[in-house]
Image (spheres, grey):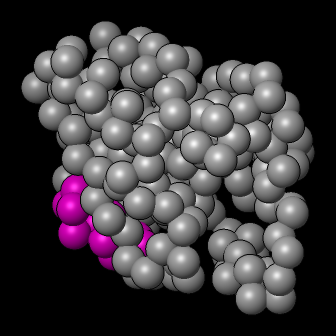
Amino acid sequence: MKKIYIIHGWSGSPDEPLHKWLASELKSKGFKVEIPAMPNPDEPVIKDWVAKLNQVVGEEPDEDIIFVAHSIGCQTILRYLAGLKTFGFFGGAIFIAPWLYVSGLETEEETNIAKPWIETPIDNVKVWKYLPENKRIAIFSDNDPFVPKENWDLFEQKFGAKIIIEKNKGHFTSDDGVNSLPSAFQAILDIAN
């Protein structure tokens, strides 16, 4: 049975409407779904988030595991994969509003939280070893206030992701009116088959 791990973003939670909707849709198709609560979501720290994912998923690749993540959760998955020392493939990954560079931060505190995530490199070659080439998908919005368009090319070039551009979805949060995302659901179904 395929298992989906949904990783929320900065200041996010498992209870966000989009995550709950995705989980419900996936469960109705027979998937197992887990949405772990990431540690200290208002002040995410790389080592803590990667350690949590390691604790939840383990270190052994499994082709029945598919990752879905939002925003900084996408980086968490990439950093988790880059840190593995085992061999094999996971089933794939869907990145929603992923970023290597972020904009629109309003306070010095936000900038300080984001800084390590921006400045600590990710070994994209190692990531490729764990995600099959045709099973990496990044979904962006054309009006995301936090994710500059340069991330579109970066995710395509560095991580070999297929890029999907949504219109007027902001940062894919309920504040942006996004409580469901059929393109992400379809992407999971495509990867799972």
Task: Between residue 161 and residue 139, name the one nearer to us.
Answer: 139
Residue placed at 80% from the left, 43% from the top? Answer: 144
Q: In which quarter of the image is the C terminus?
A: top left
- Up/down of 4 relative to 77, above or below: above
**Left or right of residue 48: residue 116:** right
> x%, y% of residue 130?
40, 43
Note whether 119 is above or below 148 in the view shown.
below
Q: Which residue is drawn at 23% across and 47% down?
A: 34
Secondary structure mostly taken by the magenta-highlighted segment of the chain? helix
Q: What stretch is highlighted in magenta?
A: 49-58
Examine the structure image and report whether residue 56 is included in the region drawn in magenta.
Answer: yes
Q: Is residue 64 visible?
A: no
Residue in the image at 37% along x and 69% along y: 38
Residue 170 visible in the current orientation: yes
Side of 105 relative to 160 (left or right): right
In this view of the protein, which residue sits in the foreground, 70 or 66?
Answer: 70
**Which quadrant would residue 123 be assigned to in this image?**
bottom right
Height in image: 152 above or below 107? above
- Looking at the rendered structure, the number of numbered marks drawn on it comes to 0
- Relative to 124, is 50 on the left or the right? left
Q: Which of 102 and 11 is in front in this view?
A: 11
Question: Where residue 70 appears, x then y in whole percent?
Answer: 54, 48
Image coordinates for residue 181, horizontal then vertical, percent:
53, 25
Q: Residue at x 83, y 88 (%)?
A: 108
